[in-house]
């Protein structure tokens, strides 16, 4: 024998040994480490995929918004731009610009000798630079070199059976039809249904001699810049906005357009952020559970190492390195899976989203998700590891010895604080709103406290008032919840948090999707007729009735202009900087009704349903809140109108808030019934017809009879919208499934943490004569109560959480599917029970002595 | 055996508190162990044997009194300094063997030297395993070894750093009588060869008889039985 001399100078084992030991030590625990990795993988995958999808969506929304505007910047005015404004345009250093003038006029189709009110657009320049102007034949333009040419709206071509080469007379000039206009960036086909468009080269507008005549004109100027609207230009625009407004000039940038693209996508990205956040937190719960299970077995090895002379630092480092490495591997695999999911997403969702979704690895999102997840993973894992610093080496000779109790472990508190801080920073980054982030974070902390209080309450209640008359199995099961080494509080917190986070997410999801659903579609109109003249209304209604359709709404639109506001002539007020010029000079299309519709509630004053012209009082009208803002209106203000030559005096009696997203005609001004019915009006009449055939036939009936009347098939629009919502819902559910998967793993690892304690106890009971069935039933009682109470409290809290999220973040109404809610409480409780019982299956079959040895 | 004292305890007591209650497990006990000496600590269950062993080995700190190992006062040492003392001067044999389950027999034996930062320790470990009769089982994991074999590995591990003092906690407690005999012989042979002081805790009267001295502990008080 040649033992090493005991007096050789001691050195610390060094990193080499620690690394070697860390590797060796994983040999028999790789399954448990895999559970740790699994908790990480799906959380990170969800996070990476959600973050990247979010970036993708944002990029697409950005691209889409540019295509919607067709340029970087657009100016609009009802007058031609003055010299001062033109000079300002010159200072913007645009790389290209285009001009457009539009006006409503009659077009005469010479072949059929029929006329139609159209929206005439005179265009010049390279617009659109983003998106395309779709024409048939393709790639047509309005180059002045082509001469007097016109692109006509597809509906006009069909209605008047136009062919290429046919003529259309506009004003004093005749234009040759060169093709159809299918789509123009920035304009929806819905809008053009009101008034079909005809496009001509700007150079020939003057020849029509329409400028300056009665018809309402508007002018647009489009600009494109090398780097879009930069900070300097944006500041300049904002500082001149007031000046522009005073001249009746409005502008839109691609950025503003992006903000306007619709609340739905914003809601979805907020929601997806929440998915990422929840996935990460649930992953953390899973990690803490998995590491606790892992270390449960390792504490004895650690004590032995300490007996053999390993320092606290060296022995802790062995496990730290394992956690670092498995955390890194888990996060790496999660990132790869996340990127794979994200790569697959465009294929899956391509047909579902209303824009081209291209796969793009967003490295910043990836790195952000990876680093956050890794840091949070390590901190969650350190929570159960840190107390082992205080593990007594005596544990090697006395198994009852554990972590030296006593003083509070400041490192555990520090780690908990860091988790909180990282979660807060993360939620700020994900929600991009400090208020929302604080709300989400505070909600989670509050939920933990409520769950902990519930656990402590249950423990205290059972300890004081555990029924003695219950059968042995129940008594034993209940006492497990309050006797020493119980894990009641921690399990209820963990199960409850899982239920709370997943179900809050679910409730937000269904509420968002519920909002997107086109409710009671069967009850909505599907055919709308526009431009119906007053003398045509009855016939149109008769034709519709003959086709078995149901009248849904009928609105008369009376055009009028404001002449006096608060007894001051509008001409003088135009110079005022406090009032918006567009609201003073626009042509109002107002209606009259005896009652308001549900989507336009009165927010101030009282709506007057009918009035008589015989009264000497001014007519009480209801105005929309945007006009109130633009004209600085208050209840009782007088407004004088010119209704096609007839002066009318009105007074503001109520203010309405209109939901403009409703597919119904909405009005700035609503008159009471009984006063302007005799004024010349255009009517919009909507019906619900059965089937597309009926719609087509009815459209044919009406158009043949009244060529001036236009019609739109709303059911097609609704179908498209519904399809989009369905598919958005699919993406949302697909991503949320990752969070649910992580939640399940967290549940398994949570239940596993209590396994060792309970298995040992059930084995002891069996050695005292309990049957396997009794031992299992005792465990079942415990898991049933923990799972049931945890899930009920968690889901109860999620109702409050989802209410807060839907009210303050998404600003929508909370929808609670009660049956699913109750089902979820039962399902999570049952899942806890099943997981707990599955855990114990293998052990319960062993004879007590073998199981004791095993333990 | 020479007369130099390797281990000395003077007026050592240990009190555990549980809630408001204090339980004095060890009461003002003193003992000395000289180089090469073998001592058995006997006593009924719950008498404080394991507590005494833990304090002697520097695994636990006494509430009062002094503990010196190779002349160094353990009381004032930090946890890591005590670990270093154990690594340099102490060997352990446990009742339930306490091999690291993820390490092979050879790796288990190597650990104490690896902890010193020494390299090329494989040869020394192999020689010790041959000495304890496990030349053929070096690369087996603890679960692949019988109880006796596991305890042999543990003994080899305890001797690898040539300790000045060896603590054995019921070394035959989990073994059958045939295996116990061979383990006891091995322990005493190696101890004699290396000139190590041996302190063992046992219920086994026969085993206690083999030691130079027997100390009895009862209700926390240590007395000399032989």
Image (cartoon, coloured by chain):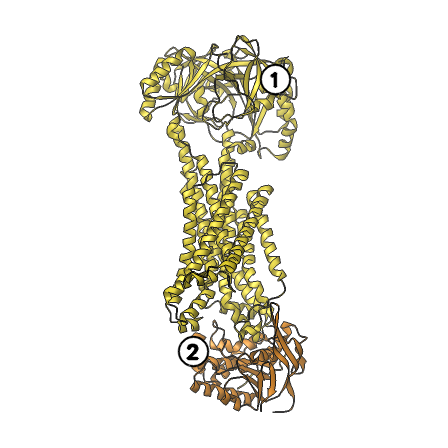
A249 or A407, which is in the foreground?
A: A407
| Camera-nearest label, 1 or 2 | 1
Q: Residue at x 58, y 64 (%)?
A: A387
* Displayed quadrant of residue A720: top left
Chain identifier of the yellow chain:
A
Quarter residue B6 falls in: bottom right
Residue pictured at 56% horizontal, 79% vertical? B50
Question: Are labels 1 and 2 assigned to the same chain?
Answer: no
Q: Residue furthest front?
A: A469
Nearer to the camera, A436 or A620: A620
Give the answer, above or below, for where B154 lies relative to A461: below
Residue B29 falls left or right of residue A294: right
Q: Chain of mark 1?
A: A
Q: Residue at x 43, y 36 (%)?
A: A725
Q: Nearer the viewer, residue A446 or A520?
A: A446
Residue A110 visible to an observer of this rendering: yes
Q: Secondary structure at mark 2?
A: loop
Q: In the picture shown, does residue A792 fall above or below A847?
A: above
Q: x%, y% of residue A648? A: 55, 10
> Which type of secondary structure does the marked residue at label 1 adopt?
loop
The dot on residue A637 is 1
Residue A485 location (% of width, % of height)? 51, 64
Q: Is residue B101 above or below residue A746?
A: below
> Which residue occupies 49% across, 81% down?
B126
Chain for colour orange: B
Q: Which residue is mark 2?
A: B145
Residue A515 x/y as whole percent: 46, 35
Report the Cα–Cα distance between label 1 and label 2: 99 Å
- Residue A560 in the image, given as x and y percentages of width and height: 53, 13
């Amino acid at each position: 024998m040649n033992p090493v001399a005991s007096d050789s100078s001691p050195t610390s084992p060094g990193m080499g040994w620690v690394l070697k030991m860390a590797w060796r030590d994983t040999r028999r625990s790789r399954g448990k480490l895999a559970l740790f990795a699994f908790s990480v993988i799906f959380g990170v995958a969800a996070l990476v995929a959600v973050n990247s999808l979010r970036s993708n969506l944002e990029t697409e929304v950005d691209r889409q918004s540019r295509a919607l505007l067709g340029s970087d910047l657009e100016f609009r005015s009802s007058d031609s731009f003055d010299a001062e404004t033109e000079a300002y345009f010159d200072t913007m250093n645009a790389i290209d610009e285009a001009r457009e003038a539009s006006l409503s006029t009659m077009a005469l189709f010479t072949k059929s000798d029929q006329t139609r009110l159209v929206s005439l657009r005179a265009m010049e320049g390279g617009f659109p630079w983003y998106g395309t102007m779709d024409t048939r034949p393709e790639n047509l333009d309005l180059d002045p070199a082509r001469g007097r040419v016109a692109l006509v709206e597809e509906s006009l071509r069909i209605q008047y059976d136009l062919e290429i080469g046919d003529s259309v007379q506009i004003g004093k000039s005749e234009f040759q039809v060169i093709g159809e206009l299918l789509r123009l960036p920035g304009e929806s086909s819905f809008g053009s249904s009101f008034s079909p468009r005809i496009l001509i080269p700007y150079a020939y507008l003057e020849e029509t001699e329409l400028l300056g005549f009665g018809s309402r004109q508007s002018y647009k100027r489009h600009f494109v810049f090398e780097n879009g609207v930069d900070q300097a230009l944006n500041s300049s625009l904002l500082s001149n906005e007031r000046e522009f407004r005073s001249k009746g000039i409005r502008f839109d940038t691609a950025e503003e357009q992006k903000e306007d693209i619709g609340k739905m996508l914003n809601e979805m990205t907020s929601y997806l952020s929440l998915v990422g956040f929840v996935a990460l937190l649930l992953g953390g719960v899973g990690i803490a559970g998995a590491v606790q299970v892992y270390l449960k077995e390792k504490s004895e090895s650690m004590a032995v190492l300490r007996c053999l002379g390993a320092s606290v630092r060296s022995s802790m480092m062995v496990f730290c390195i394992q956690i670092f490495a498995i955390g890194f591997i888990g996060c790496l695999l999660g990132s790869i899976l996340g990127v794979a999911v994200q790569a697959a997403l465009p294929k899956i969702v391509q047909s579902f989203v209303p824009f081209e979704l291209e796969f793009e690895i967003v490295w910043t999102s990836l790195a952000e998700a990876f680093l956050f997840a890794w840091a949070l993973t390590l901190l969650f894992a350190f929570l159960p590891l840190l107390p082992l610093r205080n593990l007594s080496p005596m544990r090697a000779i006395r198994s009852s010895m554990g972590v030296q109790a006593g003083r509070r472990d400041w490192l555990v508190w520090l780690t908990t604080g860091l988790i909180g801080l990282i979660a807060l920073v993360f939620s700020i980054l994900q929600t991009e709103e400090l208020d929302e982030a604080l709300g989400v974070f505070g909600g989670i902390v509050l939920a933990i406290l409520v769950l902990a209080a519930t656990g402590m309450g249950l423990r205290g209640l059972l300890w004081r008032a555990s029924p003695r008359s219950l059968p042995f199995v129940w008594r034993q099961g209940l006492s497990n919840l309050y006797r020493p080494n119980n894990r009641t509080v921690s399990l209820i917190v963990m199960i409850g948090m899982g239920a709370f986070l997943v179900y809050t997410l679910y409730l937000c999801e269904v509420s968002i999707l519920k909002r997107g659903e086109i409710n009671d579609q069967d009850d909505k109109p599907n055919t709308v007729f526009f431009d119906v003249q007053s003398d045509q209304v009855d016939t149109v209604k008769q034709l519709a009735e003959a086709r078995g359709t149901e009248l849904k709404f009928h609105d008369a639109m009376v055009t009028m202009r404001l002449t006096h506001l608060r007894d001051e002539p509008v001409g003088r007020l135009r110079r005022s900087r406090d009032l918006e010029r567009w609201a003073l000079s626009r042509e109002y299309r107002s209606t009259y009704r005896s009652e308001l519709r549900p989507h336009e509630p009165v927010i101030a004053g009282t709506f007057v349903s009918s009035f008589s012209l015989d009264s000497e009082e001014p007519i009480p009208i209801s105005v929309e809140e945007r006009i109130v803002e633009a004209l600085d209106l208050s209840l009782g203000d007088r407004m004088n109108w010119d209704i096609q030559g007839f002066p009318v005096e009105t007074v503001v009696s109520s203010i309405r808030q209109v939901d403009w997203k409703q597919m119904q005609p909405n009005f700035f001004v609503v008159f009471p019934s009984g006063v302007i019915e005799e004024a010349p009006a255009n009517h919009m009449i909507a019906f619900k017809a059965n089937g597309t055939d009926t719609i087509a036939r009815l459209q044919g009936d009406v158009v043949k009879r009244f060529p001036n009347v236009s019609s739109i098939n709303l059911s097609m629009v609704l179908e498209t919208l519904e399809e989009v919502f369905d598919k958005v819902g699919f993406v949302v559910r697909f991503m949320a499934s990752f969070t649910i998967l992580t939640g399940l793993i967290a549940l398994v690892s949570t239940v596993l943490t209590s396994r060792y304690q309970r298995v040992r106890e059930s084995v002891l009971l069996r050695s005292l004569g309990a049957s396997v069935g009794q031992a299992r039933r005792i465990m079942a009682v415990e898991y049933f109560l923990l799972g049931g109470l945890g899930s009920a409290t968690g889901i109860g809290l999620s109702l409050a959480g989802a209410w807060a999220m839907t009210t303050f973040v998404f600003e929508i109404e909370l929808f609670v599917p009660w049956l699913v809610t109750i089902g979820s409480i039962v399902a999570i409780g049952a899942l806890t029970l099943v997981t707990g019982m599955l855990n114990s299956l293998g052990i319960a079959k062993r004879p007590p002595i073998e199981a004791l040895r095993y333990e | 055996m020479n007369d130099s004292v390797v281990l000395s305890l003077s007026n050592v007591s240990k009190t555990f508190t549980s809630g408001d209650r204090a339980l004095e497990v060890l009461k003002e006990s003193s003992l000395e162990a000289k180089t090469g000496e073998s001592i058995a600590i006997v006593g009924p269950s719950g008498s404080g044997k394991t507590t005494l062993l833990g304090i002697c080995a520097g695994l636990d700190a006494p509430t009062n009194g002094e503990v010196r190992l190779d002349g160094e006062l353990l009381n004032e040492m930090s946890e890591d300094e005590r670990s270093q003392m154990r690594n340099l001067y102490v060997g352990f044999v446990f009742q339930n063997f306490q091999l690291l389950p993820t390490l092979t027999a050879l790796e288990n034996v190597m650990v104490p030297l690896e902890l010193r930062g020494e390299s090329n320790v494989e040869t020394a470990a192999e020689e010790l395993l041959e000495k304890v009769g496990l030349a053929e089982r070096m690369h087996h994991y603890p679960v692949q070894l019988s109880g006796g074999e596991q305890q042999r590995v543990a003994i080899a591990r305890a001797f690898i750093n040539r300790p000045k003092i060896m603590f054995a906690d019921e070394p035959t407690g989990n073994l059958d009588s045939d295996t116990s005999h061979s383990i006891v012989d091995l322990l005493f042979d190696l101890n004699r060869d290396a000139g190590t002081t041996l302190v063992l805790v046992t219920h086994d009267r026969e085993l206690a008889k083999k030691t130079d001295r027997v100390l009895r502990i009862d209700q926390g008080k240590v007395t000399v039985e032989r």
